[in-house]
Image (cartoon, rainbow, N blue to C red):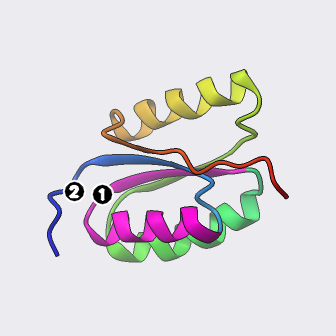
Amino acid sequence: MDLGLKDKVALVTGGGLGLGRAIAEELAREGADLLICDRVQKDLDTAAGKLRTYGGRVSTAASDLKKAGDVSKVIDQTIRELGGIDILVNNASDAL
């Protein structure tokens, strides 16, 4: 299915595991470039390795989005590394 997402930039919070990772994978399949963030870098590294197999650009940001500074950092990083944000998936949770 072509959803017209090729070369769009998506920021997916909670993208290292579970539903966030599954959403990121579908976006990657559709050709979107991604920045995924989560609290654990190891989870991000594993997810990013899989996402890169779809051919798009993938960046990661270990962050705690309960902290305003981390929110700003993730947004700034997405814009700096990928050129903007076209799609935002708010999937972060404070549940462990």
Is residue 67 found left or right of 51 in the rendered image?
A: right
Query: Quarter holding the C terminus?
Result: bottom right
Q: Amino acid at mark 2?
A: Leu
Q: Residue at x 70, y 36 (%)?
A: 65
Could you say which is closer to the camera, residue 71 or residue 81? 71
Q: Are marks 1 and 2 in contact (CB under 8 Å)?
A: yes
Asked which quadrant contains residue 49, the reply is bottom right
Dot 1: what SS? loop
Whole-angstrom CA distance, mark 1 to mark 2, is: 5 Å
**Whole-percent x, y for residue 52 in the image:** 43, 70
Query: Quarter holding the N terminus?
Result: bottom left
Look at the image and say whether residue 22 sits in the magenta stretch: yes
Q: Residue at x 63, y 29 (%)?
A: 71
Is residue 66 found left or right of 6 in the rendered image?
A: right
Could you say which is closer to the camera, residue 76 or residue 38? 38
Dot 2: what SS? loop
Q: Residue at x 14, y 69 (%)?
A: 2
Specify which label sits upstream in the sequence, 1 or 2: 2
**Whole-percent x, y for residue 17 in the image:** 65, 68
Asked which quadrant contains residue 41, the reply is bottom right
Q: Amino acid at mark 1?
A: Ala
- Dot label at residue 14: none
- Dot label at residue 5: 2
Residue under circle 1? 32
Q: Which residues are magenta?
A: 18-38
Looking at the image, residue 81 lies above or below residue 34: above
